[in-house]
Image (spheres, rainbow, N blue to C red):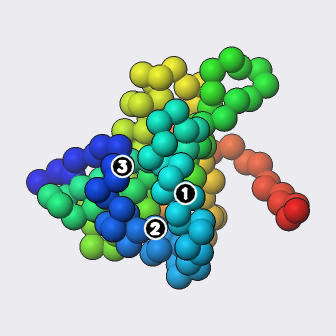
Amino acid sequence: MPVSIRPLTEDDFDRWQTLWNQNNQGHINLEVTKVTWQRLLTPGSMVGGFGAFDGSDMAGLVHYILHPVTGHIKPVCYMQDLFVAPLHRRKGVGRALVEQLAVTGKSEKWVRLYWLAEAGNTEAQALYKNLGFKIDFTLHVLPL
């Protein structure tokens, strides 16, 4: 049975939090979790998310951030988090979440969808090699 994908709702919190904590690899900050959840559910927020559901089980999640850029009037979308529960991996859940995000972006007239992935994350790289195209940039971070 294929998963169903839909925007997150208030009723999804417990299932979402389980995946959120796994995605953060045990680095749990309750205030960040609370604020992130509020942002995900606030209408008109530039932060959004979808859940992939296998029956009542949340199989995966995707979070995104819309933001303006110079050179375009419409926003671009940064895919912040894509996480699939270990039991649901290699079943097309991640691809379905990215494809739903792309469908949403097209309907809302976003300019583009982009994301970062660790070079050594072979599972993510295997998925992403057939989605979009790779641009060779280096990422530099200046903590503030």
Can you give x and y, in whole percent of width and height, for residue 99 in the image? 38, 40
Q: Nearer the viewer, residue 3 or 125?
A: 3
The answer to whether one can see residue 143 in this image is yes
Q: Which residue is mark 3?
A: 8
Viewport quadrant of the C terminus: bottom right
59 displayed left or right of 129: left
> Residue lying furthest bottom in this view?
26
Q: Which residue is mark 2?
A: 20
Secondary element under disc 1, as helix, strand or loop, is helix
Secondary element under disc 3, as helix, strand or loop, is loop
The answer to whether one can see residue 64 in this image is no
Residue 36: assigned label: 1
Specify the amino acid type for callout 2. Answer: Trp
Residue occupying the point 31% across, 58% down: 12
Can you give x and y, in whole percent of width and height, for residue 55 in the image? 14, 58
54 displayed left or right of 28: left
Specify the amino acid type for callout 3. Answer: Leu
Query: Badge 2: how crowded within 10 Å, few (<14), some, or many (20+)?
Result: many
**Residues under numbered marks 2 and 1 in contact, where contact means CB atoms less than 8 Å apart:** yes
Q: Earlier in the sequence, mark 2 or mark 1?
A: 2
